[in-house]
Amino acid sequence: MKFELGRCLLNERLMESGKSAEWLAKDLLFKPERIYDFLENKRVMPLKIAISIADSIGCDVRALYELIPNDNQFKRD
């Protein structure tokens, strides 16, 4: 099944972990603006960064975005 990315759930995951965007930026050696771009859906996290973020805050990488099933698939026989 294919999925499309919905909204970023990073803010929710940060709140659950008790961490802040500033803490995450410092932990990953990023500028805070980059984290805020993810939080505000201005930028999509590349997979490599999403994996690092998930590891830092202790969640599954798939929990960082809403995953919307794409039912408009062409099935081949």
Image: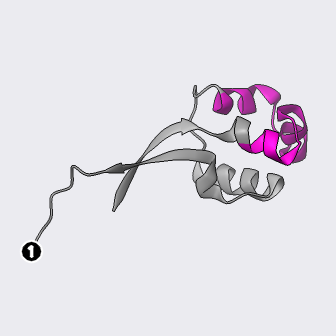
Q: Report the side of 5 relative to 59 (left or right).
A: left
Residue closest to the far front: 16
Residue closest to the far bottom: 77
Nearest the viewer among 8 and 36 is: 8
Q: Is residue 20 above or below residue 17?
A: above
- SS majority, magenta: helix
- Which portion, as a residue range, is magenta? 13-39
Q: Which residue is mark 1?
A: 77
Residue 6: give x, y in percent of width and height.
48, 39
Residue 10: give x, y in percent of width and height.
69, 40
- Give the residue drawn at x 46%, y 43%: 5
Q: Report the side of 5 relative to 50 (left or right).
A: left
- Give the residue drawn at x 21%, y 55%: 73
Tell me how the rendering is colored. Answer: one colour
Nearest the viewer among 29 and 9 is: 9
- Give the residue drawn at x 73%, y 55%: 54
Instruction: Tell how many labels.
Output: 1
SS assignment at label 1: loop
